[in-house]
Image: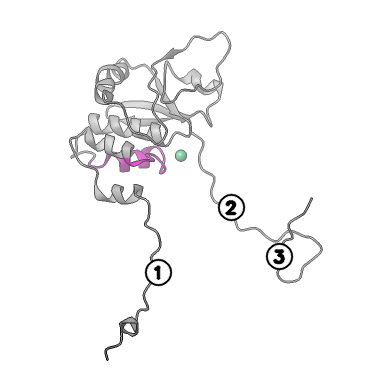
Amino acid sequence: MTVKKKQAKGGSGGGLAMPKAPPLPPHPEHRGEPVRVGPYTILAGGIRDLVAEDLEKADVLIPLLDSLPRLEFGRPYQILAAPLADYGGVPNNWEQFLREQVIPLLATEKKVLAFCHGSHGRTGCFLASLIAILETPEETPDPIAAVRKRHCKKAVESQAQAEAVFALRGEKLPQKYSMEFTKKPATVWPLPQDNWWNFLPTAH
Ligand SMILES: [Zn+2]
Protein backbone atom coordinates (compact mmCIF):
# COMPACT_ATOMS: atom_id res chain seq x y z
CA MET A 1 0.00 0.00 0.00
CA THR A 2 1.42 3.35 -0.99
CA VAL A 3 1.26 6.42 1.17
CA LYS A 4 0.98 9.84 -0.36
CA LYS A 5 3.87 12.03 0.57
CA LYS A 6 3.06 15.44 1.88
CA GLN A 7 5.05 18.38 0.58
CA ALA A 8 6.65 19.93 3.61
CA LYS A 9 7.35 23.62 3.36
CA GLY A 10 9.85 25.30 5.62
CA GLY A 11 11.74 22.10 6.24
CA SER A 12 9.98 21.16 9.44
CA GLY A 13 10.16 17.52 8.42
CA GLY A 14 9.70 14.72 10.84
CA GLY A 15 6.35 13.78 9.31
CA LEU A 16 4.50 16.52 11.16
CA ALA A 17 1.30 17.73 9.51
CA MET A 18 1.40 21.21 8.09
CA PRO A 19 -0.92 23.81 9.63
CA LYS A 20 -4.27 23.54 7.95
CA ALA A 21 -6.31 26.41 6.57
CA PRO A 22 -8.92 27.58 9.08
CA PRO A 23 -12.09 25.54 8.65
CA LEU A 24 -15.10 27.12 7.02
CA PRO A 25 -17.95 27.94 9.39
CA PRO A 26 -20.06 24.80 9.73
CA HIS A 27 -23.28 24.66 7.78
CA PRO A 28 -26.19 24.73 10.25
CA GLU A 29 -28.14 21.55 10.84
CA HIS A 30 -31.72 21.62 9.60
CA ARG A 31 -33.68 19.92 12.33
CA GLY A 32 -37.05 21.61 11.98
CA GLU A 33 -36.38 25.26 12.68
CA PRO A 34 -39.41 27.55 12.18
CA VAL A 35 -39.72 29.52 8.95
CA ARG A 36 -42.38 32.17 8.38
CA VAL A 37 -44.56 31.84 5.30
CA GLY A 38 -47.17 34.58 5.18
CA PRO A 39 -49.14 34.54 8.45
CA TYR A 40 -48.03 30.98 9.24
CA THR A 41 -44.93 29.22 10.49
CA ILE A 42 -43.58 25.96 9.08
CA LEU A 43 -40.88 23.78 10.57
CA ALA A 44 -38.28 22.91 7.93
CA GLY A 45 -35.66 20.19 7.99
CA GLY A 46 -33.68 17.54 6.19
CA ILE A 47 -33.54 13.84 6.97
CA ARG A 48 -29.76 14.21 6.83
CA ASP A 49 -30.03 16.12 10.13
CA LEU A 50 -33.40 15.22 11.65
CA VAL A 51 -33.53 12.81 14.58
CA ALA A 52 -36.61 11.05 15.95
CA GLU A 53 -37.08 13.59 18.76
CA ASP A 54 -37.28 16.46 16.24
CA LEU A 55 -40.45 14.92 14.85
CA GLU A 56 -42.17 15.30 18.22
CA LYS A 57 -42.42 19.05 17.51
CA ALA A 58 -44.79 18.43 14.62
CA ASP A 59 -48.42 17.38 14.30
CA VAL A 60 -48.13 16.67 10.58
CA LEU A 61 -45.11 15.62 8.51
CA ILE A 62 -44.77 16.62 4.85
CA PRO A 63 -42.04 14.50 3.32
CA LEU A 64 -40.94 16.08 0.03
CA LEU A 65 -39.11 12.86 -0.85
CA ASP A 66 -39.71 9.12 -0.69
CA SER A 67 -37.93 8.57 2.63
CA LEU A 68 -38.64 9.29 6.26
CA PRO A 69 -36.36 10.19 9.14
CA ARG A 70 -35.85 7.68 11.93
CA LEU A 71 -39.23 7.06 13.58
CA GLU A 72 -40.10 6.22 17.15
CA PHE A 73 -41.58 2.81 17.84
CA GLY A 74 -45.26 2.85 18.74
CA ARG A 75 -45.86 6.51 17.91
CA PRO A 76 -48.57 7.47 15.40
CA TYR A 77 -47.63 10.00 12.73
CA GLN A 78 -49.80 12.04 10.41
CA ILE A 79 -48.20 12.32 6.99
CA LEU A 80 -49.13 14.39 3.95
CA ALA A 81 -46.96 12.90 1.24
CA ALA A 82 -45.58 15.17 -1.48
CA PRO A 83 -42.55 13.44 -2.98
CA LEU A 84 -40.67 15.57 -5.50
CA ALA A 85 -37.73 14.68 -7.72
CA ASP A 86 -34.37 15.83 -6.40
CA TYR A 87 -33.22 18.84 -8.45
CA GLY A 88 -36.47 18.45 -10.39
CA GLY A 89 -39.54 20.57 -10.75
CA VAL A 90 -43.03 20.25 -9.32
CA PRO A 91 -46.13 18.36 -10.50
CA ASN A 92 -48.84 20.08 -12.53
CA ASN A 93 -51.18 20.23 -9.54
CA TRP A 94 -48.57 21.93 -7.31
CA GLU A 95 -50.56 25.13 -6.81
CA GLN A 96 -53.75 23.17 -6.17
CA PHE A 97 -51.92 21.00 -3.64
CA LEU A 98 -50.61 24.05 -1.81
CA ARG A 99 -53.90 25.95 -1.85
CA GLU A 100 -56.26 23.07 -1.11
CA GLN A 101 -54.21 20.86 1.19
CA VAL A 102 -51.22 22.65 2.70
CA ILE A 103 -52.57 26.14 3.38
CA PRO A 104 -55.83 24.87 4.97
CA LEU A 105 -53.69 22.60 7.13
CA LEU A 106 -51.59 25.58 8.25
CA ALA A 107 -54.79 27.51 8.95
CA THR A 108 -55.79 24.84 11.51
CA GLU A 109 -52.71 25.92 13.48
CA LYS A 110 -51.34 22.40 13.40
CA LYS A 111 -47.57 22.30 13.51
CA VAL A 112 -46.26 21.16 10.16
CA LEU A 113 -42.77 19.83 9.53
CA ALA A 114 -41.69 19.77 5.88
CA PHE A 115 -38.44 18.11 4.92
CA CYS A 116 -36.36 16.68 2.11
CA HIS A 117 -32.86 15.26 2.24
CA GLY A 118 -30.75 18.34 2.89
CA SER A 119 -33.53 20.93 3.43
CA HIS A 120 -32.36 22.99 0.46
CA GLY A 121 -33.79 22.17 -2.97
CA ARG A 122 -37.18 20.63 -2.46
CA THR A 123 -37.83 22.20 0.96
CA GLY A 124 -36.62 25.56 -0.34
CA CYS A 125 -38.97 25.27 -3.31
CA PHE A 126 -41.87 24.33 -1.03
CA LEU A 127 -41.26 27.26 1.32
CA ALA A 128 -40.69 29.78 -1.47
CA SER A 129 -43.85 28.56 -3.22
CA LEU A 130 -45.90 29.21 -0.10
CA ILE A 131 -44.32 32.65 0.24
CA ALA A 132 -45.19 33.35 -3.43
CA ILE A 133 -48.83 32.55 -2.73
CA LEU A 134 -49.28 33.89 0.80
CA GLU A 135 -47.31 37.14 0.48
CA THR A 136 -47.95 39.88 -2.05
CA PRO A 137 -45.33 40.85 -4.67
CA GLU A 138 -45.22 44.27 -2.98
CA GLU A 139 -44.48 42.69 0.38
CA THR A 140 -42.05 40.06 -0.89
CA PRO A 141 -40.99 40.70 -4.49
CA ASP A 142 -38.54 37.78 -4.55
CA PRO A 143 -39.73 34.65 -2.70
CA ILE A 144 -36.43 32.85 -3.37
CA ALA A 145 -34.39 35.64 -1.81
CA ALA A 146 -36.83 35.58 1.11
CA VAL A 147 -36.46 31.85 1.77
CA ARG A 148 -32.69 32.11 1.47
CA LYS A 149 -32.76 34.79 4.15
CA ARG A 150 -35.33 33.14 6.43
CA HIS A 151 -34.20 29.50 6.10
CA CYS A 152 -30.85 28.88 4.40
CA LYS A 153 -28.75 30.59 1.77
CA LYS A 154 -28.60 27.28 -0.13
CA ALA A 155 -32.38 27.05 -0.52
CA VAL A 156 -33.73 26.32 -4.04
CA GLU A 157 -31.26 24.32 -6.07
CA SER A 158 -32.53 24.00 -9.62
CA GLN A 159 -33.93 26.14 -12.39
CA ALA A 160 -37.08 24.01 -12.47
CA GLN A 161 -37.69 24.70 -8.78
CA ALA A 162 -37.03 28.41 -9.20
CA GLU A 163 -39.33 28.63 -12.25
CA ALA A 164 -42.09 26.87 -10.31
CA VAL A 165 -41.93 29.49 -7.58
CA PHE A 166 -42.28 32.48 -9.92
CA ALA A 167 -44.87 30.68 -12.06
CA LEU A 168 -47.21 30.74 -9.05
CA ARG A 169 -47.31 34.51 -9.52
CA GLY A 170 -47.56 34.28 -13.28
CA GLU A 171 -44.02 35.60 -13.55
CA LYS A 172 -41.05 34.41 -15.56
CA LEU A 173 -37.86 33.50 -13.79
CA PRO A 174 -35.76 36.65 -13.24
CA GLN A 175 -32.60 36.63 -15.30
CA LYS A 176 -30.32 36.52 -12.29
CA TYR A 177 -31.67 33.08 -11.44
CA SER A 178 -31.43 31.88 -15.04
CA MET A 179 -27.78 32.86 -14.85
CA GLU A 180 -27.31 31.14 -11.49
CA PHE A 181 -28.71 27.82 -12.62
CA THR A 182 -27.28 27.80 -16.13
CA LYS A 183 -24.03 25.98 -16.40
CA LYS A 184 -21.09 28.17 -17.14
CA PRO A 185 -19.95 27.87 -20.76
CA ALA A 186 -16.71 26.09 -21.47
CA THR A 187 -13.65 28.26 -21.26
CA VAL A 188 -12.90 29.92 -24.58
CA TRP A 189 -9.28 30.12 -25.59
CA PRO A 190 -8.51 33.83 -25.30
CA LEU A 191 -7.15 35.79 -28.21
CA PRO A 192 -4.10 37.89 -27.42
CA GLN A 193 -5.35 41.24 -26.22
CA ASP A 194 -2.86 43.64 -27.78
CA ASN A 195 -1.70 42.28 -31.08
CA TRP A 196 -4.55 40.11 -32.25
CA TRP A 197 -4.05 41.50 -35.77
CA ASN A 198 -0.87 39.46 -36.05
CA PHE A 199 -3.15 36.49 -36.50
CA LEU A 200 -4.82 37.99 -39.61
CA PRO A 201 -3.69 36.60 -42.98
CA THR A 202 -0.88 38.70 -44.41
CA ALA A 203 -1.82 40.71 -47.51
CA HIS A 204 0.47 40.27 -50.52
ZN1 LIG B 1 -28.77 24.79 4.67
Q: Nearer the viewer, residue 165 or 104?
A: 165
Number of the front mark, 1 or 3: 1
Query: Looking at the image, which residue sits at the far right?
Result: 14
**What residue is pinned by disc 1?**
189
**Residue 201 locus on image (x, y percent):** 30, 83
Secondary structure of the residue carrying numbered label 2: loop
Picture disc at residue 23: 2
Q: What stretch is highlighted in magenta?
A: 141-159
Picture disc at residue 19: none
Residues at marks 1 and 3, CA–CA distance in whole angstroms: 32 Å
Tell me whether the residue at label 1 lies in contact with that at label 3, contact meaning CB atoms closer than 8 angstroms. no
User: Of marks 2 and 3, which one's residue comes earlier in the chain?
Assistant: 3
Q: Is residue 32 visible?
A: no
**What residue is pinned by disc 3?**
7
User: Of marks 1 and 3, which one's residue comes earlier in the chain?
Assistant: 3
Q: Which colour scheme is used?
A: one colour
Would residue 105 appear left or right of 65 to someone viewing this image? left
